[in-house]
Image (tube, coloured by chain):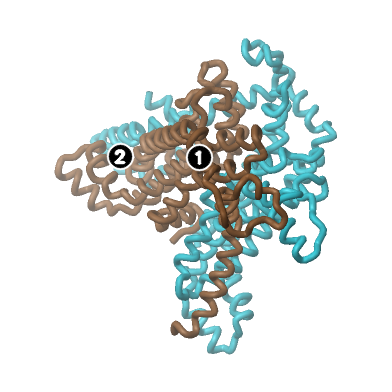
Chain colours: A brown, B cyan
């Protein structure tokens, strides 16, 4: 297709993308709007004589929440990788008895609505005194990612040629050594995909945060926004500025890791 | 220990017999035995994890739904076992029928629009053009944003007095609509936001499905004189069916779960007009001053049954696709 024939499609594509991303634009626009202009009719379509007052509120009120979310996200990634990678190695390469049943359980585990898990966790954490703790939230958030992570890792490791494994064995490597020095380094792409999604899901989680961690000193950013809406629902520039800041991880992901993101969306749904 | 970790998954031991059985010599059997030990050593973390963080919470949830919990007995234990009374109470509640209807409407309407728009966009992006890769990547943004961000942005856009949607309607002379604060519109509003969030997933999966249709088929159809519309209905659509089925079923599972979006935008209101089973369950357990954990968990059980039914159909459909 020549460039000349494709430019109407490009224009149409730009328009469609513009429509799709309008809410994102509007979030940014509102985050810069002055409080006095907030209820103006018609609204300011562009942030002319904008203000960074909203972002100043973010710096003032939301930094601890952001820190907690970062901690929870990283903890979730670590826990997910520790649990999922060895399991996937076994499922993909070691033919465990009952492995298929385990894969089936993992698939079904993905279907369970988070709100139901949240109720069970709430009952357990209440008895154990784990409510409002970062560790408790990390465990709960990891349940979103672990089944997905095992499936992604398994699909990836199944593609490692058996000869590679065999060569390691001939060289005297045991199963653990083969996993650690051969399978894991080769699965770098799967590790990146899993880490990205585990972090993003933990960062975005609202169900577990609002049920298990709503009262403590260390609350994640999703609750920061939620309480902002509840407490001062007049300062929408501050709310939207927080939303913009909370969207930064997703934006960074899109920019630096688009191919891993697409891989994560499609695997499990479509076979190549 | 090996034995105990195997119990929860011992269901299909026979299923793998083919690859695991060898010649009946003692040495081979011993080697096989040690390999099974290694295999299950690697599986131990995930098995313990599944038992502790999936099976146990689900058991506690089931326990909640079968007992008469009050705030005090929730903390100190000793709630009375009342069998299915919570379930009966929930099924007889006047809020049940509307919540079920809203769940079904929310799920089906969301799915239909997400899929149709996602498919149209996938077909549009299937032929690459200048900037197409970048624009396709940008379409992913709504899916990756935290739900609370999307939900609060839509809340403000749909605000009755100061929302940009009503401002735009005013420009073309349409009276403002009370999107989130009137019972007629609230369900539609949350569906609108949910469709927006779901389009990227449908686009990406269907786009990948389209890429796997061989180009020769289109060339052959063109030679036979098929126009673009006929090519879509006679080539694309039939060949995309397996992928479509899986996209829709995964979408069904995800949409049944949706809770945060509705809760943040409308809290299920006004007067329950956008309450689904998920938000109802949350409100019973966490949304009121006096929590009703038993009925909340009972609603959750209904939701699990629906989600698992959809999940089983999904797994069957996926197996069928792999076998082809």
Mark 2 or 1: in front is 1
Q: Name the residue under label 2.
A: B24
Residue B183 percent location from the top left of the image: 82, 45
Q: Residue B178 carries which label?
A: none
Report which quarter residue A149 is drawn in.
top left
- Can residue B10 be seen here? no
Q: Above or below — where is B219 with respect to A162?
A: below
In the rendered image, is residue A187 in sight? Answer: yes
Secondary element under disc 2, as helix, strand or loop, is: loop
User: Is disc 2 in the same subunit as disc 1?
Assistant: no
How far from the left and from the top, in percent, is residue A192?
36, 48
Residue B215: % across, % down: 47, 77
Residues at marks 2 and 1 touching, judged by CB atoms closer than 8 Å: no
Image mark 1: chain: A
Residue located at (55% from left, 37% from top):
A222
Q: Mark 1 points at which residue?
A: A56
Dot 1 surroundings within 10 Å: few (below 14), some, or many (20 or more)? few
Looking at the image, residue B283 sits to the left or right of residue A83; the answer is: right
- When asked about the image quadrant of residue B200, the answer is bottom right
A78 vs A101, nearest the viewer: A78
The chain identifier of the residue carrying mark 2 reads B
- Where's the C terminus of chain A, which quadrant? bottom left
Identified at 58% across, 27% down, the residue is: A214
**Relative height, residue B79 to residue B129 (above, below):** above
Cα separation, mark 2 vs mark 1, equals: 74 Å
Q: Residue at x 30, y 34 (%)?
A: B38
Q: Position of residue B218 (x, y in %)?
A: 52, 80
């Amino acid at each position: 297709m020549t460039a000349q024939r494709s430019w109407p499609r490009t224009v149409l594509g730009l328009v469609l993308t513009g429509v799709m991303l309008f809410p994102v634009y509007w979030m940014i626009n509102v985050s810069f709007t002055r409080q006095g202009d907030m209820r103006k009719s018609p609204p300011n379509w562009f942030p002319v004589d904008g203000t960074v007052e909203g972002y100043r509120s973010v710096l003032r009120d939301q930094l601890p929440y952001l820190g907690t979310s970062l901690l929870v996200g990283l903890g979730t990634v670590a826990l997910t990788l520790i649990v999922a990678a060895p399991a996937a190695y076994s499922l993909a390469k070691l033919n465990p008895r009952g492995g298929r049943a385990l894969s089936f359980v993992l698939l079904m585990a993905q279907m369970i609505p988070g709100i139901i898990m949240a109720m069970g966790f709430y009952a357990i954490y209440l008895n154990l005194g784990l409510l409002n703790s970062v560790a408790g939230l990390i465990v709960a958030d990891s349940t979103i990612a672990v089944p997905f992570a095992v499936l992604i890792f398994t699909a990836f490791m199944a593609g490692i040629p058996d000869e590679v494994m065999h060569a390691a064995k001939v060289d005297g490597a045991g199963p653990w050594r083969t996993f650690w020095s051969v399978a894991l380094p080769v699965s770098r792409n799967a590790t990146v995909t899993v880490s990205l999604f585990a972090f993003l899901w933990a960062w975005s989680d609202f169900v577990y945060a609002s049920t298990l961690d709503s009262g403590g000193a260390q609350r994640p950013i999703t609750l920061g926004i939620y309480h902002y809406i509840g407490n001062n629902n007049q300062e929408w520039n501050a709310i939207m500025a927080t939303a913009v800041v909370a969207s930064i991880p997703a934006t960074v992901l899109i920019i630096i890791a688009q191919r891993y993101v697409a891989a994560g969306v499609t695997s499990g749904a479509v076979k190549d | 220990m090996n034995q105990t970790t195997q119990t929860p998954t011992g269901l299909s031991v026979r299923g793998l017999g083919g690859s695991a059985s060898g010649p009946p010599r003692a040495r081979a059997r011993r080697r096989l035995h040690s390999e099974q030990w290694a295999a299950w050593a690697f599986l131990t973390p995930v098995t313990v994890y599944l038992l502790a963080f999936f099976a146990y919470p689900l058991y506690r949830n089931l326990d909640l739904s079968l007992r008469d919990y009050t705030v005090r007995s929730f903390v100190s234990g000793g709630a009375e076992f009342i069998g299915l009374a919570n379930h009966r109470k929930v099924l007889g509640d006047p809020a049940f029928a509307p919540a079920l209807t809203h769940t079904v409407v929310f799920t089906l309407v969301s799915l239909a629009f997400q899929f149709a728009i996602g498919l149209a966009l996938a077909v549009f992006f299937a032929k690459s053009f200048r900037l197409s890769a970048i624009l396709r990547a940008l379409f992913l943004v709504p899916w990756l944003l935290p739900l609370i961000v999307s939900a609060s942005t839509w809340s403000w856009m749909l605000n009755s007095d100061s929302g940009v949607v009503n401002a735009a309607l005013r420009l073309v002379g349409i009276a403002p609509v009370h999107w989130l604060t009137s019972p007629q519109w609230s369900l539609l509003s949350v569906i609108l936001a949910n469709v927006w969030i779901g389009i990227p997933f449908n686009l990406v999966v269907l786009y990948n499905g389209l890429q796997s249709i061989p180009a020769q088929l289109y060339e052959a159809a063109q030679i036979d004189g098929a126009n673009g519309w006929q090519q879509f209905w006679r080539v694309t659509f039939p060949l995309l069916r397996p992928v479509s089925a899986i996209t829709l079923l995964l979408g069904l599972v995800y949409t049944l779960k949706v809770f945060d979006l509705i809760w943040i935008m409308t809290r299920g209101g006004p007067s329950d007009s956008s309450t689904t089973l998920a938000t109802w369950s949350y409100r019973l357990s966490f949304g009121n001053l006096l929590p009703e954990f038993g009925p909340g968990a009972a609603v959750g059980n209904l939701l699990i049954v629906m989600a698992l039914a959809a999940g089983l159909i999904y797994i069957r459909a996926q197996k069928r696709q792999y076998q082809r």
